[in-house]
Image (cartoon, rainbow, N blue to C red):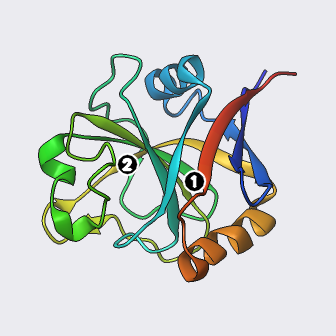
Amino acid sequence: MARRMRIELTRRGVSCTARLLDEEAPRTAQAVWEALPQSGQVYHGKYARNEIYALVPPFGGIADTRENTTVTPIPGDICYFHFTPEQLGNPAYGYDADSEAGTGDLVDLALFYGRNNLLINGDQGWIPGTVVATVEEGLEEMAAACASIWMDGARGETLAFSRLED
């Protein structure tokens, strides 16, 4: 039976449902499932384009897993990234001084909500992500809320990932 998770923008009260890709990314899907719930300040992608994400502490003992990777995520992809402080510490990335970025390894859990995404960073080069889940319900409403984050701001908004039990 497929495992599903809920992804929510808590202040905006918008959510979607994603199915974990257990066959395509078994180690990462298992680690994500076991680590749920996870949440954090939402950020909107600066380089990738149509992406929102949260930075959370590492989990599951899978620092830099590479399975079911992409550099061109499509709408509805949920991606896992692992970053070191050196990769996120550049002040140009815009993280607040009180954020966790730059203080230790972090996991980036990202939702891609639109087309034409490209995972390249001017400082780092290509940043392949593990596609760990795919949104099956609620992407259109979530995409509108993500566009609001881009245009209206992310401060005070939380991106939350939780298990959906059948």
Q: Quadrant of the N terminus?
A: top right
Q: Position of residue 24 (x, y in %)?
A: 52, 34
Tell me whether the residue at label 2 lies in contact with that at label 1, contact meaning CB atoms closer than 8 angstroms: yes
- Counting residues from the start of the chain, the first of labels 2 and 1 encountered is 1
Tell which residue pokes out farthest to the right in this image: 166
Q: Position of residue 113 (x, y in %)?
A: 61, 66
Reading the image, the residue beneath label 2 is 129
Residue placed at 32% from the left, 31% from the top? 65
Q: Quadrant of the C terminus?
A: top right
Residue 77: which disc? 1
Residue type at mark 1? Asp
Q: Is residue 83 above or below residue 126?
A: above
At mark 1, the secondary structure is strand
Residue placed at 81% from the left, 57% from the top? 138
Label 2, label 1: how far apart the Cα atoms are: 10 Å
Name the quadrant containing residue 49: bottom left
71 or 156, which is in the foreground? Answer: 156
